Amino acid sequence: MAQDFKAIESIQTPRGELPKKQVPIKVVIPEDQFLDFADTVAVQSTEQEFILSFLQLQPPLVLSSVDVEQTEFIETVCVSRIVLTVPRVMELVQALQQELQNYTNKAMAAPKAGSAQEKKAE
C-alpha cells in the first residue's frame, strides 16, 4: 500500500521547539488485522471532529409471506466507529475522490464481455 503521509516537522517541548526534521511515517497493517464489511455509513459532526459509524444491514431470514408480514424492522449493526479531526476528514475526502477516479478509469478501460475488442483477440 503506497500512501504519502505528512511527516512530523517540529516537536514542541517544555524547553522550546526542537530543530525541524522530516520524519517519515511508516504504515503498518498487521496481517491478522480484522476486516469487516459495512454497507451503510452514518456521519455526525461536532465543532472539532467527525464521527463515522460503519454499519452492516442485518436482513431477517424470510422463508414465506408470513415472515414478510411479521417483519417490523430491519436491524443494522455498528461494526466500527471512527472519530476524525476536520483536517483528516478533508484528506479522507480527497483520497476517496482520487481512488474513485482511479477505479472509474480502470473500469472504463477494461473491455466489456462480448465486446469487439474481445472478439478481435480470439
Image (spheres, rainbow, N blue to C red):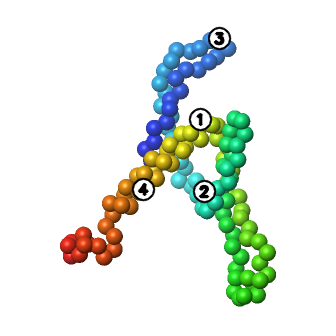
Mark 3 nearby-residue class (10 Å; few <14, some 14–19, many ≥20): few
Can you tell which mark lies on residue 87? 1
Return the x and y of residue 61 as percentages of the image width and height: 70, 80
Q: Which residue is mark 3?
A: 15
User: Where is residue 114 drawn, in percent x and y?
Assistant: 31, 76
| Residue of label 2 | 34
Instruction: Give the secondary structure at mark 4.
Output: helix
Image quadrant for the C terminus?
Answer: bottom left
Residue ID for mark 4: 103
Whether 96 is drawn above or below 5: the answer is below
Picture quadrant of residue 35 = bottom right
| Helix, strand or loop at mark 2 | loop
- Quarter of the image for residue 72 reads bottom right
Callout 4 crowding tier (Cα within 10 Å): few <14, some 14–19, many ≥20:
few
Classed neighbour count for the residue bearing mark 1: other residues with Cα under 10 Å, few (<14), some (14–19), many (≥20) = few
Position of residue 23 relative to residue 90, above or below, is: above
- Under mark 2, the amino acid is Phe
- Residue at the image position 55 percent from the left and 49 percent from the top: 30
Question: Is residue 89 toward the left or the right of residue 111 in the image?
Answer: right
